């Protein structure tokens, strides 16, 4: 089941208690847009409310034929809602949609797909045990005399993949192929032969650079064939690579549409946030320079950790009050190493010393008891319990400590939850709101609260700002820095280079399961770290290349 | 901003599905009672109340354990068979077929404790299969669903055991302050389970395991232990229900005790509004669900509709309840 992120909250954007007034979006642009008859799609003055709370108010959005149009905004700005209204997942309350010259009324994603609107989601929704053909033709199998027409289906699947320059034996099970091919199969399946408009909802969030390049080729290919693409992404750099125009959403409104070559990154960010930000010029992240004197003695040190090919030989250490960063490509073994530290998996070799004692956790509760917390990279499937409230989610780890002979102390719990909602600036209607109704950034804050409530000594943060909008991202980064300043040891894994380089006091680079380099803050330049990620060592070191 | 959000929450428009998902079972029950007041003869009598309460008791007792199991995202198909085991074992003990015990009170106490305890152990076995070997609950409990009744028949050589032991049958026929003992038992179990689910760490952990098992594990919850305990509780509940059934009947037939009970219990849980996929549970809902199903059956029977037709209506109610639940979750 697809988890729905409710994007229902509106109101002023709170940035650590300082509220910033937002200018109103201009009405002129809204009216000007719907008139364009060359558009493949035009959505005008769309309203959508959830339980009375507006998620979209007067949003307008138009996509030309063969255009790649970026749709950006913070979490909760209404991007997902707008797309779900378009694909018939939600019914709009007001407004009109014209697609391909005709009024567009659909009540399900299947109908939208039949009319030529395909959606590719973040997650790959495929069946790994079945063949490529079965995956591509799932739900629209060719039949002859009531039986499956395998020959025709194989041909169709091959033809479809060839369109994207993928050659693969379509009869083999999908799981035998690499992620890039699987991703292409997912795209091929979604697009089919008849799509006129393809919506890509953060398609690159789980891809490495090479896979992203392949995806961008697909987008260019589609564009050449006259197919329009709506591209939703949090990564601003990507937009300049493939998009023609961009529409920026904020608080359920479409506040700006511009050609990509007429707007710079600062322009995008300030339109998303509704204010001018100076930070975007100097630093790309909210990690300002840190005072190294506050860093204490080594809290956790790990030597030669190994489990299998993914983690072969990893050594690192983290000191109190320090942010240690793990850099590396996808599959370098960063998350897997963190899982060893937290006792989720057991190492085959290697030793760990935590707080001066040998540390060999059997299960997460051992690591928690020792004073660790772990914010997973996969918020949805390993982090939140969606149907539980903000309070219940936040108290999940602390609860046993907060109880008297197994009975929960409701009052103590409420006090703590309310304090963290305030401190972390969590936007919710109260401690009892279901956590699945919150935006990604706020869910992440709830999870941070879950661990901070434990008052840990070491906090492992795996991709702490993935899939989170720019504003919430800055807040979380600033928060991590504050926590380290207060003496917390932080082990931060991030695939965003600038986050690691600007945020971490020391950067450990992992490559193919081996810790290949360590940089102090002043040595950690983008070039040096990237070179270690790619080649396994700094370029000057001898013996790196055969 | 919280002020605006709060105002909007108050002015939230009426959502019929959400409302029905929340109060549907209660409303259905109220409507059924009103209907019976109007159309069923002799409905407003203590006897009718007693008949319905005693009939619904065993289902509710089993369904309480089932609710906890389902809340963790599991299911327990073995409850009917465990009732048969407990129902076969107890008479063997208090009739002195295994070891003669002179004192009747002692024999009855031993019979109750051992029979219920053995059912609990079998429940623990279910939990062990599920937690240790990660066998799907429906398959793991299918083992005892099949084997359990076989064990009960082997224990008794397939013979019907009849008895007249008032000390034992007090649990099914006796009264406490004029209320049937089994009704008291049911109410106590319901209150204890509802309180446990709402107010204790363990209750919260049950819901967390059902809501997101991996998140629960990463938060330090001993997921395996939670599962072991809920299946054990389900076994214990089935054991108690088995005793009640044979006490009412003055006999124990391993072929019949608890037959189809697993499905009645699951139906009560579903109609009561507990999510079958786990992560959300209501014990009071289960109680209301069981009473609704019971009252529908009674209403139809009392108005001359044959039992076979009542089964179809029962199925209809389950479909309706699940549909309303899903609609309520959509928006």
Image (tube, rainbow, N blue to C red):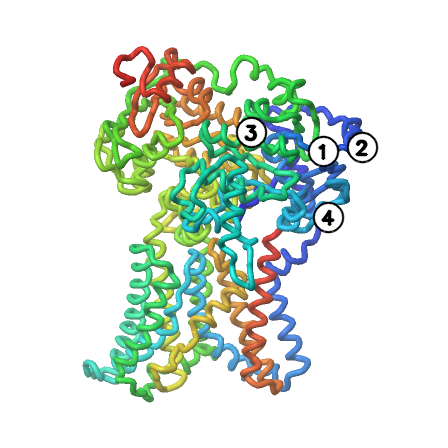
Q: Nearer the viewer, residue A207 or A415?
A: A207
**Labels 3 and 1 in the same subunit:** yes
Label 3 residue SS:
loop
At 23% from the left edge and 27% from the top edge, which residue is drawn?
A303
In three-dimensional space, the C-alpha distance between marks 2 and 3, rounded to whole angstroms, equals 29 Å
Label 1 residue SS:
strand
Residue A430 point in image, percent of width and height: 57, 41
Mark 2 belongs to chain: A
Residue B43 point in image, percent of width and height: 61, 82
Residue A234's tag is: 3
**Labels 4 and 1 in the same subunit:** yes
At 27% from the left edge and 18% from the top edge, which residue is drawn?
A546
Instruction: Please indicate whether residue A522 sits to the left or right of residue A133 in the image.
Output: left
Circle 4 packing at 10 Å, graded few (<14), some (14-19), many (20+), is some
Q: Which residue is mark 4?
A: A105
Instruction: Please indicate whether residue A130 sits to the left or right of residue B292 in the image.
Output: left
Q: Which residue is mark 1?
A: A62
Is mark 4 in CB contact (under 8 Å) with mark 1?
no
């Amino acid at each position: 089941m697809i988890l729905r992120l409710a994007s229902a909250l509106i109101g002023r954007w709170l940035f650590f208690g300082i509220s910033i007034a937002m200018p109103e979006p201009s009405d002129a642009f809204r009216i000007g847009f719907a008139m364009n008859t060359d558009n493949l799609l035009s959505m005008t003055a769309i309203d959508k409310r959830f339980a009375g709370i507006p998620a979209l108010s007067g949003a307008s959005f138009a996509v030309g034929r063969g255009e790649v149009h970026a749709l950006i905004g913070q979490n909760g700005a209404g991007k997902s809602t707008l797309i779900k209204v378009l694909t018939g997942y939600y019914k709009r309350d007001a407004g009109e949609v014209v697609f391909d010259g005709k009024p567009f009324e659909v009540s399900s994603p299947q109908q939208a797909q039949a009319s030529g609107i395909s959606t590719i989601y973040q997650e790959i929704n495929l069946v790994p045990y079945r063949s490529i053909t079965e995956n591509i033709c799932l739900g629209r199998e060719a039949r002859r005399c009531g039986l499956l027409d395998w020959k025709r289906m194989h041909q169709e699947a091959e033809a479809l993949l060839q369109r994207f320059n993928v050659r693969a034996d379509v009869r083999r099970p999908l799981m035998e192929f690499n992620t890039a091919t699987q991703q292409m199969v997912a795209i091929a399946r979604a697009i089919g032969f008849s799509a006129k408009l393809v919506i890509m909802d953060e398609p690159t969030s789980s891809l490495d650079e090479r896979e992203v390049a392949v995806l961008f080729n697909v987008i260019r290919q589609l564009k050449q064939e006259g197919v329009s693409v709506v591209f939703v992404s949090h990564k601003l750099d990507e937009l300049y690579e493939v998009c023609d125009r961009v529409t920026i959403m904020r608080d359920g409104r479409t506040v700006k549409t511009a050609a990509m070559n007429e707007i710079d990154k600062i322009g995008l960010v300030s339109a998303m946030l509704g204010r001018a930000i100076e930070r975007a010029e100097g630093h790309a992240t909210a990690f300002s320079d840190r005072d190294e004197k506050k860093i204490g003695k080594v809290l956790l040190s790990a030597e030669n950790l190994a489990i299998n090919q993914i983690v072969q030989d990893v050594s690192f250490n983290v000191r109190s009050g320090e942010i240690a960063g793990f850099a590396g490509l996808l599959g370098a073994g960063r998350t897997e190493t963190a899982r060893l530290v937290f006792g989720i998996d057991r190492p085959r070799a290697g030793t760990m010393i935590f707080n001066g004692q040998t540390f060999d956790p059997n299960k997460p509760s051992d690591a928690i008891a020792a004073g660790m917390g772990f914010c997973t990279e996969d918020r949805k499937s390993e982090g939140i319990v969606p149907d539980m409230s903000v309070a219940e989610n936040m108290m999940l780890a602390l609860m046993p400590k907060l109880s008297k002979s197994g009975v929960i102390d409701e009052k103590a719990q409420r006090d703590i939850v309310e304090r963290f909602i305030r401190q972390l600036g969590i936007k919710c209607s109260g401690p009892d709101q279901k956590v699945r109704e919150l935006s990604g950034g706020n869910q992440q804050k709830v999870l941070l609260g879950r661990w901070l409530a434990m008052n840990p000594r070491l906090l492992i943060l795996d991709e702490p700002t993935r899939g989170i909008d720019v504003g919430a991202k800055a807040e979380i980064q600033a928060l991590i820095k504050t926590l380290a300043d207060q003496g917390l040891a932080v082990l931060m894994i991030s695939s965003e280079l600038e986050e690691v380089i600007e945020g971490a006091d020391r950067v450990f680079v992992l490559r193919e399961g081996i810790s290949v380099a360590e940089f102090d803050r002043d040595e950690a330049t983008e070039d040096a770290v990237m070179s270690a990620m790619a080649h396994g060592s700094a370029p000057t070191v001898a013996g790196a290349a055969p | 901003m919280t002020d605006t959000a709060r105002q909007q929450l108050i002015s939230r428009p009426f959502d019929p599905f959400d409302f029905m998902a929340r109060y549907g079972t209660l409303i259905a029950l109220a409507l059924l009672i009103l209907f019976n007041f109007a159309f069923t003869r002799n409905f407003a009598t203590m006897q009718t109340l007693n008949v319905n309460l005693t009939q619904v008791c065993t289902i509710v007792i089993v369904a309480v354990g089932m609710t906890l199991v389902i809340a963790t995202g599991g299911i327990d198909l073995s409850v009917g068979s465990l009732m048969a085991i407990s129902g076969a074992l107890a008479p063997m003990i208090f009739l002195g077929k295994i070891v003669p015990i002179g004192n009747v009170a002692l024999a009855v106490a031993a019979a109750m404790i051992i029979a219920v305890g053995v059912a609990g152990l079998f429940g623990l076995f279910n939990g062990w299969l599920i937690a240790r070997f990660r066998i799907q609950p429906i398959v793991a409990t299918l083992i005892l669903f099949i084997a359990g009744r076989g064990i009960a028949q082997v224990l008794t050589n397939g013979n019907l055991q009849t008895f007249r032991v008032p000390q034992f049958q007090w649990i099914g026929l006796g009264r406490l302050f004029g209320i049937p003992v089994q009704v008291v038992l049911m109410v106590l179990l319901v209150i204890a389970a509802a309180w446990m689910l709402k107010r204790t760490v363990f209750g919260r952990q049950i819901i967390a395991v059902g809501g997101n098992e991996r998140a629960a594990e990463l938060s330090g919850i001993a997921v395996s232990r939670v599962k072991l305990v809920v299946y054990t509780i389900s076994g214990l509940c089935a054991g108690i229900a088995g005793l009640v059934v044979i006490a009412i009947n003055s006999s124990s037939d391993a072929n019949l005790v608890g037959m189809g009970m697993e499905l009645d219990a699951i139906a009560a849980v579903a109609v009561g509004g507990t999510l079958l996929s786990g992560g959300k549970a209501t014990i009071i809902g289960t109680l209301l669900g069981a009473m609704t199903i019971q009252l529908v059956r009674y209403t139809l029977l009392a108005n001359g509709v044959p039992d076979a037709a009542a089964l179809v209506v029962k199925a209809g109610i389950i479909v309706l309840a699940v549909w309303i639940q899903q609609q309520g979750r959509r928006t």
